[in-house]
Amino acid sequence: MTTIFTKQINFLNGKINCKSNLSSSQNLVDFFDLFFVCEVTARKLIEYYHAENNLTAKTETEKYNMTSLKAAVKHFSLSINEPTLQNIFRAGVGKRNQKSCRQLRNAYIHSLLDDDKAEIENRFNQLKTDMDTWINLF
């Protein structure tokens, strides 16, 4: 049996005692609200594209990726530029102050780091503009 060391226990205790602080920032609440709408609409758009073209994906990752999203956007003749699409939905880890909305959502939700919260708040206006551009397609 593996023993959890004091350092690890302290880290876990810190996370347990940490709050997400969503309610402390209206921009943070708005960011997650907007991103959830973006994510749901992107997933549905890809599903509609796959259904209309009789496509099947072997895995969720294969089905819901940037390639599928770009193909669906093109198929349904939606007008959104590549940088905006990338700024919202790019996957991976990302670099500080250059993360996509998806990367920021994942980073903050999975680790509650103050740096990710600060990046969301500092870049909120641009992130919101990009997400509004996506949402307004529909």
Image: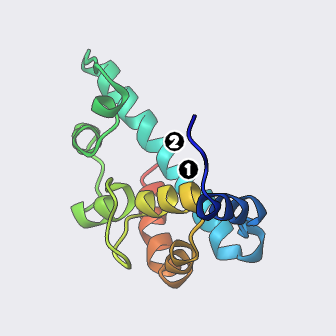
Q: How many labels does the image show?
A: 2
Q: Label 2, secondary structure: give it.
A: helix
Q: Name the kind of residue labelled 2 in the image.
A: Val
The quarter of the displayed image where residue 31 is located: bottom right
CA neighbours of label 1 inside 10 A, class few (<14), some (14 to 19), many (20+):
some
Residue hosting label 1 = 37
Task: Tell me the CA gap for discs 2 and 1.
Answer: 5 Å
Residue that badge 2 annotates? 40
Residue that extends furthest to the bottom in the rendered view of this protein = 122
- Say which mark, if any, is on residue 88: none
Hey, what amino acid is under mark 1?
Val
Give the residue at x 38% y 64%: 100
Residue 59: x and y in percent read 32, 24
The residue located at (58%, 34%) in the rendering is: 1
Label 1 sits on a secondary structure element that is helix
Q: Is residue 117 left or right of residue 17?
A: left
Give left or right: position of 106 versus 99: right
Residue drawn at x 70%, y 66% is 14
Find out whether the residues at labels 2 and 1 contact each other: C-beta distance under 8 Å.
yes
Q: Is residue 18 above or below residue 49?
A: below
**Quick one: 117 or 48, which is closer to the camera?**
117
